[in-house]
Amino acid sequence: MTLIGIVLQVLCSCRAISTFLKADEVVAEVGGVKLYRSDLVEVIPSGVHHEDSVRLAKQYINSWASDQVFLRIAEEQLSKNEKDVSIELEEYRKSLLKYRYEQLYVNERLDTAVSEDLIRQYHEDNQDKFILARPLVKARFLNIASDSPNMDPIRKLMTSSDVNDLYEADSLAYSSAIRFTAWGGEWVDASVLAREFGEDLSTLLASARNGWIERNDGDGYVKVAYVAERLEKGTVAPLEYCATKIKDIIISVRKQNLVVELEKQLLEDAVESGKFVIY
């Protein structure tokens, strides 16, 4: 489609962009609509390298120009009725106002305190909602030089059930490995561990021997993981793994109940005051 009467000026060279950054002047124009240097300053982060700022400026100018071109064509090609968006705008305005008042009402009344007993009870009553889609593991992972003198001591200490031994293992791993993580000793989705190795989850877990998984990268480093505990797919996720999610669910239900309560109360008040009448 040919655009008649649309003048598009985009500054593309590094030299041009460097020039317009020195003064608040027009940097692009589409059909009489102008983009100013001050508009670019608002979208380009301060402290960005010159070449990056040039790239960001070009991207923004082109995006802005595209929007203006589409808008100009729409104004020219759509009928008067098609351009009338007053109904949609009014519906959006009413929806936005309703949402904002709901948020105000809920924020003033929402109880966000959720007891451990309530979380535990919810977990017990809704275990079907917490069936694992993938295995969970408690594991320690490290990427370490294969000839590190700390490799054997770390291996021995990691298999211990003594807390002090595990602390020592972590300390050695932190000081020796180029990467070490124990995920805070918490349950973690086994796919997270698989990503550390860059392997398929099922293949990785199938290769575990007495809890150990090991891969030599051929460059003098070895990736090692010790899986201390493992829960299989299809089992119920433990409470400690679900606790945060359960708390969010309980708070979400409270929010919804407050909104329902608000709508009910407003209707009742409107009926009593005679503002709401059904004929």
Image (cartoon, rainbow, N blue to C red):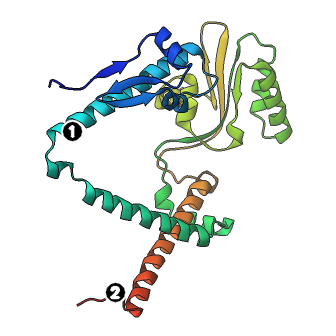
Which amino acid does the dot numbered 2 rest on? Phe
Q: In the image, residue 69 lies at what x, y percent?
A: 27, 30
Residue 58: horizontal and vertical position, in percent?
43, 20
Residue placed most toward the observer, 202 or 172:
172
Which residue is found at the position 27% from the left and 37% from the top? 71
Q: Quadrant of the N terminus?
A: top left
Q: Is residue 82 left or right of residue 241?
A: left
Pick the quarter of the image with the C terminus.
Answer: bottom left
**Mark in the foreground, 1 or 2:** 1
Under circle 1, the secondary element is helix
Picture quadrant of residue 192: top right
- At 24% from the left and 26% from the top, the residue drawn is 6
Q: What's the residue at 82%, 40% (across, down)?
A: 162
Residue 246 location (% of width, % of height):
57, 60
Separation of marks 1 and 2 at Cα, in angstroms: 41 Å
The type of residue carrying mark 1 is Ala
User: In the figure, residue 46 lies in which quadrant?
Assistant: top right
Residue bearing the label numbered 1:
74
State whether residue 124 is above or below residue 43: below
Residue 201 visible within the image: yes
